[in-house]
Amino acid sequence: MPRILVAGCGYVGERAADLLHEAGWIVEGWTASQESAARLNDKPYRVRAVDIADVSAVSEMRSDFGAVVHCASSGGGGVEEYRRTYYEGAINLIKTFPAATLLLTSSTSVYAQRDGSWVDETSATEPSRETAKILLETEMITLAHKGIVARLAGIYGPGRSFFLRRFLAGEANVDLTNERYVNQVHRDDIATALILLLSHYEPLRQGATADERNIFNVVDNRPFLTREIYEWLATHLSMPAISSGTDNASGKRGESNKRVSNRKLRALGWGPKYPTFEEGMATSVIPSFGDLHAS
């Protein structure tokens, strides 16, 4: 197995690094801070504190990595932090490891459709948000380097669920006059998808058409309306249903309304362990939140 760098050993990256190590890859992980690296010092693979947006720090880490996974997070930062982390980070990784296969974790937020339509990797990407535009720029330089782009849906998993936290905090409501679909994927399913993409990598051919490019949506099998999500949570937790009103959800996917297809990734043999939000929440996420009714 080749040596692989996981640049961004956070919520998704740590899980991917764990599974890559278990599969026999020689793994090194990077985090942006010494504190994060120290938290992972008991891992069976090396973890170092390297800010990928710092060109001098990255250039000092020259190695013979066969693949690099760029899954660093902006930490919820704004436009400038997005540019530093994603775009500048990708450039630094490409320059430092030019022979390595680069796998970028992007986002389905690059699809800005608002009509509830199904989208796949050939669909228009015309986002209005500056952060999503930066992701598209980063995708382009990744593809120009013959790399792989994984567009992740909304991430959830143990200890992490945007909708569950809003529901428990009493902040959930749905605008029944303007319902929208949301697309999600469990952290563990993202990790297995990244490994599969690295294993099936084929360089981008000269003149390849859009549907042949190395872009893959990483999303579970069923989009849900926000109303359906909150209704399911209320029933499953035996708690009062939410009220209708203005949906004040914020975030990079808050303005869109589309259903994202995973057909292309499934054609490679990928199948999510948690095919739907309901299955992932019931068996993986809700048990990790402890005493929910006391939250």
Image: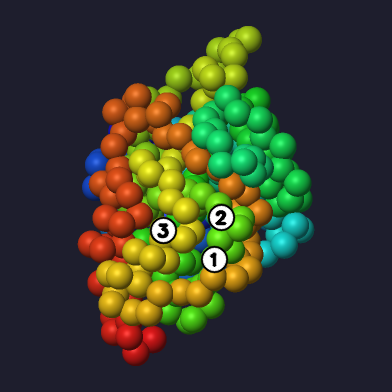
**Residue drawn at (33%, 49%), measured in percent from left and top?**
276
Question: Which element type, helix, strand or loop, lies under badge 1?
Answer: strand
Please, which residue is most extreme toward the bottom here? 294
* Figure check: 1 above or below 164: above
The disc at residue 179 is: 2
The answer to whether 274 appears left or right of 193 in the picture is: left
SS label for mark 2? loop
Q: Could you say which is closer to the camera, residue 74 or residue 133?
A: 133
Residue position marked by numbered label 1 in the rendering: 174
Residue 125, given in percent of the width and then of the height, sits at 67, 34
Give the Cα distance between marks 1 and 2. Answer: 7 Å
The reply to whether discs 1 and 2 touch (Cβ–Cβ < 8 Å) is: yes
Judging depth in this view, the residue of 92 and 110 nearest the camera is: 110
Quarter of the rendering occupied by the N terminus: top left
Label 3 vs 2, first from the N-terminus: 2
Residue at x 74%, y 50% (from the top left corner):
129
Q: Which mark is residue 228?
A: 3
- State the image coordinates of residue 53 (x, y, percent, origin top left): 67, 54
Which amino acid type corresponds to the residue marked 3 in the rendered image?
Glu
* Residue located at (32% from left, 85% from top): 293
Drawn side of residue 282 relative to residue 96, left or right: left
Could you tell me residue 115's position as x and y percent?
62, 41
